[in-house]
Amino acid sequence: MIPSLGLENKVVLVTGGNRGIGAAIVNLLVDLGSKVAYTYRSQHDSQLGTLAICADVTDKAVMEVVAKQVEDTLGPIYGIVANAGMTRDNFFPKLTTADWDAVIETNLTGVYNTLMPIIPKMYERRTGSVVCISSISGERGNLGQTNYAASKAALIGFTKSLAQEAARYEVRVNTVAPGFIETDMLNPIPDKVKQRILSEIPLSRFGKPQEVAWCVAFLLSAIASSYITGSVLRVNGGHYT
């Protein structure tokens, strides 16, 4: 039996919820009884969640429509999981302006676009929980990921600042920072490099998407994490502490 975290019938919006960590979050929240809406840009699986919406988080006007559609269809949004993200890796001298802009606009500005139509309503209702998905790269850096690491590090500062503002309205804001997780993002990494990374992880394995999803559910829960806000929860097997 799955334990109750008090998320039954809570409306939660997950961006980038169609695959990888996002899909694991959507599936777990559904199992916990939440009404889950999620956005996607490609590879839509209609079996996921309660409401699937094709939307690009980089488009502010579109995300305003998404927020309205979710609330009109499912009810007031209690939780937001800002998960949508992308990588365009390259060593800095070869990093194009287009690749820099694409990653920053999706991973950072996309969070602004997602939260802006919803946060004021959470303040009015005096309830809500936001979880941003950062990365170990945003804390310790990573070769060839100056754009990605910058966007994920910025999310941590964003979380800590918004948490201080939102606390007076009883809205909590936290971040989960996964390490190397078994998703499509690992596929391009050569086996030799994977072995080197594994040698640096005390638990000697890569994480599973479901392990990140449980941490997200914990932070969404007003039962399990009611006194936690402005925090970064690391899910990296001890790779960075």
Image: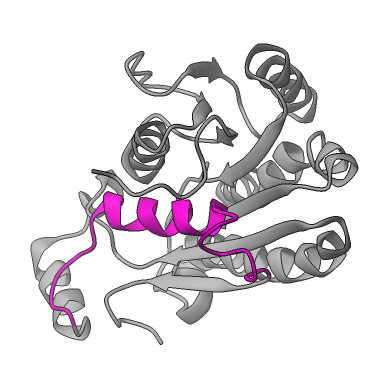
Query: Which one is nearer the viewer's eye here, 106 or 238?
Result: 238
Q: Is residue 67 left or right of residue 4?
A: right
Q: Position of residue 157 (x, y in %)?
A: 71, 71
Taking the spot 42% from the left edge, 59% from the top edge, the residue there is 215
**Which of the 4 image quarters holds residue 114?**
top right
Q: Quadrant of the N terminus?
A: top left
- Does 55 sit above or below residue 7? above
- Figure coloring: one colour
Q: Position of residue 9 (x, y in %)?
A: 54, 29
- Does 206 sit above or below residue 57? below
Q: Is residue 133 visible?
A: no
- Does 135 sit above or below residue 171? below
**Count of numbered badges drawn on the protein:** 0
Taking the spot 26% from the left edge, 48% from the top edge, the residue there is 183
Query: Which one is nearer the viewer's eye here, 196 or 46?
Result: 46
- Does 116 sit above or below residue 53? below
Query: Which one is nearer the viewer's eye here, 97 or 206?
Result: 206
Q: Quadrant of the C terminus?
A: bottom left
**Which of the 4 image quarters holds residue 102?**
top right
Q: Is residue 207 left or right of residue 226?
A: left
Q: Position of residue 112 (x, y in %)?
A: 75, 46
- The boundaries of the magenta stretch are 203-229
Asked whether 167 falls inside the magenta stretch, the response is no
Taking the spot 59% from the left edge, 54% from the top edge, the residue there is 131
Q: Position of residue 192 (x, y in %)?
A: 9, 70
Q: Is residue 130 visible?
A: yes
Q: Is residue 43 left or right of residue 204?
A: right
**Which of the 4 image quarters holds residue 26?**
top left
Q: Is residue 176 left or right of residue 114?
A: left
